[in-house]
Image: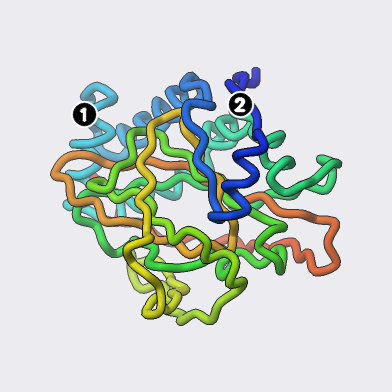
Amino acid sequence: MHAPLTRQICRSDLETYARDGYVVLRGVIDTAPIDALMASVAHVIRLESGSTANDHRVLNEALIALKKANPSSSSWIYQTIQSSWALRQFFADIDITGMVQTLLEMDDINNLGSVSPAFRFDIPGDARNIRTWHQDASYFLENGAGTDHLVAWIPLNTATKDNGSVIIAPGTHNDGRLPRDYAEANGFASEQYTADMDDHDTSRFITVEAEAGDIAFINMDLLHSSGVNVTQDSVRYTAQIRYNTINRADYRPVFLKPEYPEYQRNG
């Protein structure tokens, strides 16, 4: 059953999104689907760590300890959650498609596509998987214009500057698709498409601080970056999904090739 949203997109939201390239809506998602997803995440961590602690300690202490002791095990946890039924159920339950259609100015839901339903955790001190300054459109090529696709960024617990919440450069979506430098994945470090930020005013950068139940919609051409989790014992959890417009002449559906890496499992 879909959990009802507390409100839909209004005119001021549209104006903010058009001007800044993103909009944050506060307290619009019922926390029940978030709680269900995080309970599933705790279950997966227990499977790998062997911990019998309560959910709070498993989601923080157990995962942090496992990441330090065996990065391959934390990679197994991460990838297992990506393909879990619980993650797909979460996106179905929050049902944000009406909001997305409004932001994309789309009348017919049959023209709505999606890609990369994803889950992310950010461990204290882990800088290897930080997404440096980039546009999501460098990674996701379904549409050519940033106005035709967006990412929904959903905090699953409190997101702050200290635990590495997303940093935004407002208005940079108006520059369109920018040149970027590519660095391939290396070991447990993620691949990167990095934008040149030398000419941007750092005083205008904004860290999005948010709670579970909030949601940010971000234009795919907007420059943004992950922060660094500098806490000692707090893992930051988020979910993301990208939406696109399929009735555009330049629309390109992605072709995904499965990969099955070997993991050095815990125990």
Residue 5 location, x and y as percent? 60, 23
Q: Which mark is residue 93?
A: 2
Q: Quadrant of residue 41?
A: top left
The residue wearing badge 1 is 57
Circle 1 packing at 10 Å, graded few (<14), some (14-19), many (20+), is some
Q: With respect to residue 200, does 110 lie above or below?
A: above
Amino acid type, label 1: Arg
Residue positioned 69% across, 36% down in the render: 97
Q: With respect to residue 49, does 263 lie above or below?
A: below
Residue positioned 46% across, 68% down in the render: 134
Q: How far apart are the alpha carbons under marks 1 and 2?
A: 26 Å
42 left or right, relative to 10: left
Dot 1 or dot 2: first in sequence order is: 1
Q: With respect to residue 173, does 77 lie above or below?
A: above
Q: Quadrant of the N terminus?
A: top right
Residue positioned 27% across, 48% down in the render: 161
Q: Is residue 76 visible?
A: yes
Work out whether residue 216 or residue 50 is closer to the camera in this orientation and state it: 216
Q: Quadrant of residue 190?
A: bottom left
64 left or right, relative to 12: left
